[in-house]
């Protein structure tokens, strides 16, 4: 649906470098990256607001690179929504149809339909200043959807909202996309937000796309230590890798050693970064008997327990200078009867040890 | 004075404790002194005035002519000034080009330049070959009403440009971007979105141009002179009348201008505050 | 002109497509026209100048006296203006009191008021009982050098107050709050933290006061007259010389003032930009 | 250590109403509330920056109400840190000692010690503009600690930082407090942040303190529906309560019914709000046999599964119009073999059903 080929754009000291990306029809695609990584710039290129230095952008099979924003068939919801402050909600939403010189009655009908769909009928005659953040967001969505765009581009659509409503509005976005079948590109910097909405995700880092995949792929198999840090992998350790039969032995700085399945790993040996997600560490008060082959078993003592309600996070000190973060479901934690200060045993399956190149 | 319309301090300081009270009192004393000084000046004006003389004087044909000339020249100046201010304010706010900072400074120059220098420069310009050629085509400026407008535009347009630029600086370009994705051309987005949003700032710019144009005196003396019924505007009247000792007449005109300036100031405040 | 030092647009608009290019070109055309117009004026000035005459003229004792008078009166004005501007700018920025908006507007009035009106008001004030009493105590202003300073302070201090207020508006009061928890009194926090942080804004305010004070002409004509060697400042020189037809002399002085204004503008830009 | 009695303060249209609070010595106390609830205003009252209308503030047994900020023995870290931009890091930190006219050498020694403790030695000669958010925070902390305050007041100390570093800086704050034994009041609007640091927490709502307790009390037993919504209780249902032997029967709008232990509940009958935390709902593919007495057993079908890495959230439709949010640890979810569309059984123990007054 959207195909970006070898896009390059330099702006002042920042550059989008060699970006290629394919977003499938009816997909909910998330561009995830930290502030200043170039996500907004990339969205503006898709909109046609920034002339690109080289490369091609195709939407629905048409090369839109030379086209103006109004001819690209896109709906755009920028950061902070950018509603027209001098127009009522009704006129904000109807703006696109007015530009098409549609008949008054058909504009009215279409705007009413959209306001109904997004639940903002009661706001029709209000001005944007009088709306709450969530209401503004829905009006901006309706305004972008009125021309039935082939592609919907959302730039940080929930960042301006408070934390309590963000989650539910994200789920509404996802439902809206499912019902309208509009291919959607959603820019965000929040990892949890991405997990709620994304079919697939592209990680943006310093003007490049460093990984594309499903949320679970990015979560479990980040392509680099930067990505891992950004998706809050929890435990990242520098290590020296060495082959050991069917396993890869990973001697971490600090005195602990992990084993990973060798076929999963591109690197044979050398300096690497090891990632173990906190939920993939199995905690027990006693050393497991007969662990499955390849399982890494470590001993440690619990330093700190943080109860986050649904989730409990534990800091476990292992070896000389290694602290591992372990997370458990609340119910699981309650049944484990582990408390701060306890001596525990940790087990990690070889397939849960993810090895990355040293950056 | 413009900026106060656009910014307010993030929080204000509450006054606590003896130290705090003494400190606030000493800072506010300067405010009181300055404001009282200004008020004393205006009260003196008002107490000195002779209503009968004023009424008589305002019926004088030469003063009526000056009032009329001031009114129409400043109105034309506002129109011309805004014709430049709107596109220039927009261009300086939205576009970055090589030499942007230099151009921006040159635009500010007439604000900081002594107005008299502008008048003299105009006089000199029309003695150069280019100036002579322009006058030879029939567009006469020196010692003409047209010259009043030219002079006023040069010394006042920058105030309007600055106000309009500030207004566009405060309008998120993303609003225009959205309009462009909704079927507008670049120009369409400007006329349908940016311009209506900037209307208050443009009005403020117009008022600022007007106040400056209306009050200008020095450059007019140099460039168009002070000929009764011909190039006499209200400030010229004040000067001419007081120089022959008729201070009541000068004062009557001055108070009229004072009131108009106060009205303009209040208008700027009200229009500008609504802008936030 | 001040505000441009403190705000910049959030993003600028890149120029894309034919429509976009045509639109940008037409907007920028106004910028070009205005800037070229101004430049033409100054080029005309420079082309008209006669170096030899200038050098001769600048050695004339009356012009030297005027230069000297301009220099010291404007310097004194800057000192007095800042003495008011710093506490007033701080008070207007930090404290809210009943009538704050009114006081704020009155402080702005001299910016918007025709300067000639200020001159006439001063003249009138010193004819009232209070004014006479002041002059009787030996503080003579009318047709005196002290009157030049008084006139300059009244028309220019507001520019400084405005600039300083803006600067303090931009300084987070929390920084002073922290200083107060770290052992400072209210006044201590002002002198040790707020004042050093505002130094660039205060310099900008001083330059703005100076440019306005230096270029003032109309009110001086009314209040102190144009007496050679006594109350003649540089703008007066321009007027006197051109009125007797010695345009080269007037022009030489004008160019000097033009250069000084340009220097002041550049200084304001550089100092102000550093402030961000 | 800090005792606030009947504090009242009206500012424009907002007011702090009748605030009484007691913070114990060496406690890490968090003031939690949404934006605009008056937390910052309350902190400024503690600092002595706002004159209060009525009431009393005591610090360490001394009535400080009439005292100036400099005489209260407090260390203050405001939002965005408010470092002195015209001073180097060293001079920022030494500012308090300079005001006390301490000797140069002793200032130098003390500042060096603090910079060492907070790990900012290498920044000594830099100016604040050149620091990262985390560095600024530590410098602001050092500056506040230099006079050895009896009380440390932190206003949103990590809100300005990016999400990746927030968690670790919160833990550093907590450790710092443990090592310096300074009574600390920390203002924040983020619920998860509070759970990491707080010994006790006060919930601020529209200028009032509506609940004070340990993090777990607030989490499990919010005092009102507003608090519950703010701490992201997950499932909040309007219901009619009626006594039923030793249980309270709670007929929810939407057709499901819960049972709660009667002695836990103040209300005997009437309209109430029922809260069930997502981690307290036990999920099974078949109806449990012989559930413990009082257990609520519901049937439903899984609408949506969101995998958040360590945590999995499920939306389960029960009854006519009720959707319940259920959360499981990742490991627990994997072993349950439940997927979207499945028919499931939900069990909730009576002590996990929390009943609140209708607001």
Image (cartoon, coloured by chain):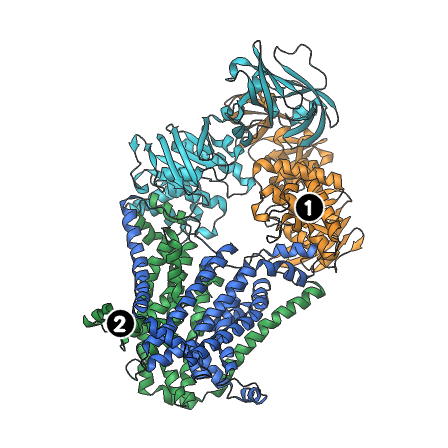
Chain colours: A cyan, B green, C blue, D orange
Tell me residue D121's x, y (percent).
66, 42
Front residue (pair A93, C251): C251
Question: Camera-side residue: D89 or D148?
Answer: D89
Circle 2/circle 1 CB separation < 8 Å: no
Q: Is residue C110 left or right of residue B103?
A: right
Q: Residue at x 55, y 87 (%)?
A: C135
Circle 1 residues within 10 Å: few <14, some 14–19, many ≥20 = many
Return the mark for residue D142: 1
Task: Say whether residue C190 is left or right of residue B40.
Answer: right
Tag in front: 2 or 1? 2
Given the image, what chain letter belongs to the residue carrying mark 1?
D
How packed mark 2 is, by other alpha carbons closer than 10 Å (few <14, some 14-19, many 20 or more), is many
- Front one among C73 and D89: C73
Q: CA distance from mark 2 to mark 1?
A: 68 Å
Q: Compared to A219, does B228 lie above or below?
A: below
Residue pointed to by mark 2: B126
Please give left or right for residue D1 compared with residue D138 in the image. Answer: right
Under tag 1, what secondary structure?
A: helix
Q: Is residue D271 visible?
A: yes
Place of residue C210 in the rendered image (x, y in percent of width and height, measured from the top left): 48, 70
Asked if residue A281 is positioned above or below residue D20 in the image, the reply reads: above
Q: Quadrant of residue A232?
A: top right
Q: Is residue B259 visible?
A: no
Establish if B178 lies above or below C111: above
Q: Residue A326, position in %: x, y?
A: 64, 25
Q: Is residue D237 above or below residue A87?
A: above
Q: Name the one closer to the observer, C17 or D119.
A: D119
Q: Quadrant of residue D32?
A: top right
Q: Chain of mark 2?
A: B
Seen in the image, is D27 located left or right of residue C27? right
Q: Tag 2, which secondary structure?
A: loop
From the top left corner, tell me how far across and down residue D81 is, in percent.
62, 48
């Amino acid at each position: 649906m959207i195909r970006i080929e070898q896009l390059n754009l330099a702006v002042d000291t920042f550059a989008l470098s060699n970006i290629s990306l394919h977003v499938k029809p009816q997909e909910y695609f998330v561009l995830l990256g930290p502030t200043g990584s170039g996500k907004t710039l990339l969205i503006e290129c898709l909109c046609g607001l920034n002339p690109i230095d080289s490369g091609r952008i195709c939407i629905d099979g048409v090369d839109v690179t030379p086209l103006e924003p109004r001819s690209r068939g896109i709906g755009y919801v920028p950061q902070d929504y950018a509603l027209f402050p001098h127009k009522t909600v009704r006129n904000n939403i109807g703006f696109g149809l007015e530009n098409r010189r549609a008949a008054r009655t058909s504009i009215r009908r279409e705007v009413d339909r959209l306001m109904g769909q997004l639940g903002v009928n009661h706001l029709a005659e209000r001005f944007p200043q009088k709306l709450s953040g969530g209401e503004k967001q829905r009006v901006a969505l309706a305004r972008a959807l009125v021309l039935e765009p082939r592609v919907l581009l959302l730039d940080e659509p929930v960042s301006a909202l408070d934390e309590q409503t963000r989650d539910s509005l994200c789920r509404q976005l996802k439902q809206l996309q499912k019902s309208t079948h509009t291919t959607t590109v959603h820019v965000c910097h929040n990892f949890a937000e991405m997990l709620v909405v994304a079919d697939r995700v592209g990680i943006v880092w310093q003007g490049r796309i460093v990984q594309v995949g499903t949320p679970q792929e990015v979560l479990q198999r980040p392509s680099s230590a930067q990505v891992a840090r950004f998706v809050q992998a929890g435990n990242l350790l520098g290590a020296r890798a060495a082959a050991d039969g069917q396993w890869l032995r990973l001697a971490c700085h600090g005195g602990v050693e992990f084993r990973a399945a060798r076929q999963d790993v591109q690197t044979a040996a050398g300096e690497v970064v090891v990632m173990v997600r906190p939920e993939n560490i199995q905690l027990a008060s006693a050393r497991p008997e007969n662990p499955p082959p390849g399982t890494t078993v470590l001993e440690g003592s619990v330093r700190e327990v943080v109860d986050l309600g649904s989730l409990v996070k534990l800091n476990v000190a292992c070896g000389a200078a290694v602290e591992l973060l372990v997370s458990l479901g609340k119910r699981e934690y309650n049944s484990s009867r582990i408390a701060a200060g306890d001596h525990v045993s940790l087990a990690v399956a070889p397939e849960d040890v993810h090895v990355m190149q040293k950056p | 004075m413009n900026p106060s319309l656009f910014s307010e301090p993030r929080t204000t300081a509450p006054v606590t404790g003896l130290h705090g009270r003494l400190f606030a009192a000493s800072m506010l004393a300067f405010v009181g002194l300055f404001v009282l000084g200004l008020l004393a000046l205006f009260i003196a004006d008002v107490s000195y005035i002779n209503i009968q003389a004023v009424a008589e004087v305002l019926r004088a044909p030469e003063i009526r002519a000056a009032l009329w000339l001031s009114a129409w020249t400043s109105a034309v100046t506002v129109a011309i000034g805004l014709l430049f201010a709107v596109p220039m304010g927009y261009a300086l706010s939205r576009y970055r080009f090589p030499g942007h900072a230099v151009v921006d400074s040159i635009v500010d120059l007439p604000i900081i330049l002594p107005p008299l220098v502008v008048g003299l420069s105009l006089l000199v310009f029309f003695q150069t070959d280019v100036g002579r050629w322009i006058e030879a085509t029939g567009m006469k400026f020196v010692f003409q009403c047209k010259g009043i407008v030219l002079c006023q535009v040069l010394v006042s347009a920058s105030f309007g440009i600055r106000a309009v630029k500030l207004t566009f600086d405060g309008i998120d370009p993303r609003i225009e971007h959205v309009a462009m994705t909704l079927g507008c051309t670049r120009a369409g987005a400007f006329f349908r979105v940016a311009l209506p949003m900037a209307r208050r700032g443009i009005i403020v710019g117009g008022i600022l141009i007007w106040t400056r144009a209306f009050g200008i005196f020095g450059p007019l003396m140099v460039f168009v002179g002070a000929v009764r019924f011909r190039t006499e505007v209200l400030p010229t009247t004040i000067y001419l009348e007081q120089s022959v000792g008729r201070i009541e007449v000068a004062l009557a005109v001055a108070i009229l201008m004072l009131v108009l300036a106060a009205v303009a100031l209040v208008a700027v405040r009200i229009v500008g505050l609504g802008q936030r």
